[in-house]
């Protein structure tokens, strides 16, 4: 099955700085890579996803890059704000429709 | 659209009791997933259904766990008998065409289960 590794496990940045979270996956057949944000006590919510036919996708302050050769993808958040503080999960399909999640990154944006 | 609806939000039970978690997926979504979230193991897929049929239950921990989807708008996850190590947040999620077809998961608010 798919193995997804995510790092760092915790990330602390100053407000206005950028944050980068990285993930690697094992299944070269994976073709869909979503990112979820989970605030404390709430459900994971999709913030951005990328398909394997593109190398980068942006949505306002959030961007995701994908390197299929190296089997890694990254989440970039620019101009971080306190409301960006949450746990972020990457994911990759592990055969069929089995979405395997990374272990999560606790992002803290400090004032 | 009300999103994925789960009940109850919180469940506290004693070891050995039967627990039933419920889920109503988004209307029109063909895929339904049950995930379990703990600090130690993160988000684990337990089972998923396509058009009400269980497709992959390899994540179900043991025979104490069972899941059903009698129709397109309802699914249950049952634990019998429950044990303290089952304490976790259980999420239900649905997807219109499945992640294989690049369709995202939409999660419910989860059920926080505590087994004492």
Image (tube, rainbow, N blue to C red):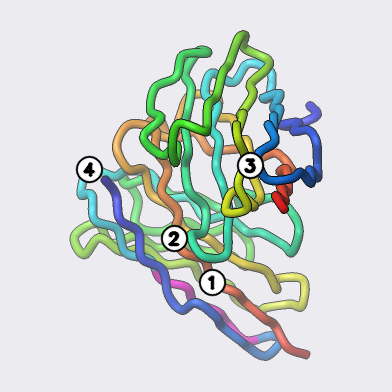
Q: Secondary structure at mark 2?
A: loop
> Looking at the picture, how far across and down is residue A18, in whole percent?
57, 82
Is B72 positioned to the left or the right of A110 in the image? Answer: left
In this view, the mark in front (4 or 2): 2
The alpha-carbon separation of the residues under discs 3 and 2 comes to: 16 Å
Q: Residues within 10 Å of mark 4 (few under 14, many from 20)?
A: few
Chain letter of mark 2 equals: A
Identify the residue position indicated by label 4 in the image.
A29
Q: How many marks?
A: 4
Residue range (magenta): A17-22
SS label for mark 4: loop
Q: Nearer the viewer, residue A78 or B9?
A: B9
| In the image, residue B14 above or below residue B53 | below
Which residue is drawn at the image coordinates 74% and 45% (left, top)?
Answer: B14
The residue carrying mark 1 is A105
| Marks 2 and 1 in Cβ contact (< 8 Å) | yes
Q: Which is more foreground, mark 3 or mark 1?
A: 3
Q: Nearer the viewer, residue B48 or A61?
A: B48
Residue A31 at x, y percent in the picture: 32, 43
Mark 2 surroundings: few (<14), some (14-19) or many (≥20) residues within 10 A: many
3 and 2 marks on the same chain:
no
Q: CA distance from mark 4 to mark 2?
A: 17 Å
**Which label sits on residue A102?**
2
**Mark 3 packing: few (<14 Cα in 10 Å), some, or many (20+)?**
many
Q: Is residue B56 magenta?
A: no
- Whether pointer 4 and pointer 3 mark residues with C-beta atoms closer than 8 Å, the reply is no
Q: Report the front residue among B56 and A100.
A: B56
Identify the chain of the residue marked 3, using the numbered disc in the image. Answer: B
Q: In the rendered image, which residue does mark 3 sit on?
A: B91
Q: Nearer the viewer, mark 4 or mark 1?
A: 1
């Amino acid at each position: 099955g798919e193995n997804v590794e995510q790092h760092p496990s915790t990330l602390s940045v100053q407000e206005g700085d950028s944050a980068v979270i990285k993930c690697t996956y094992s299944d070269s057949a994976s073709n869909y890579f979503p990112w979820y944000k989970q605030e404390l006590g709430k459900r994971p919510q999709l913030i951005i996803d990328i398909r394997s036919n593109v190398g980068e996708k942006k949505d306002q302050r959030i961007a995701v890059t994908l390197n299929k050769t190296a089997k890694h993808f990254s989440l970039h958040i620019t101009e971080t704000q306190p409301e960006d503080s949450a746990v972020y999960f990457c994911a990759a399909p592990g055969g069929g429709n089995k979405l395997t999640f990374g272990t999560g990154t606790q992002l803290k944006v400090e004032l | 659209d009300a999103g994925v609806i789960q009940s109850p939000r919180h469940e506290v039970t004693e070891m050995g009791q039967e627990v039933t978690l419920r889920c109503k997926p988004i209307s029109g979504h063909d895929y339904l997933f049950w995930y379990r979230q703990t600090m130690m193991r993160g988000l684990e897929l337990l089972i998923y259904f396509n058009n009400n049929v269980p497709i992959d239950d390899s994540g179900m921990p043991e025979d104490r766990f069972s899941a059903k989807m009698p129709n397109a708008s309802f699914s249950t996850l049952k634990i019998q008998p429950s044990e303290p190590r089952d304490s976790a947040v259980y999420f239900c999620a649905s997807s219109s065409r499945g992640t294989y077809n690049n369709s995202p998961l939409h999660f419910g608010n989860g059920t926080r289960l505590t087994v004492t």
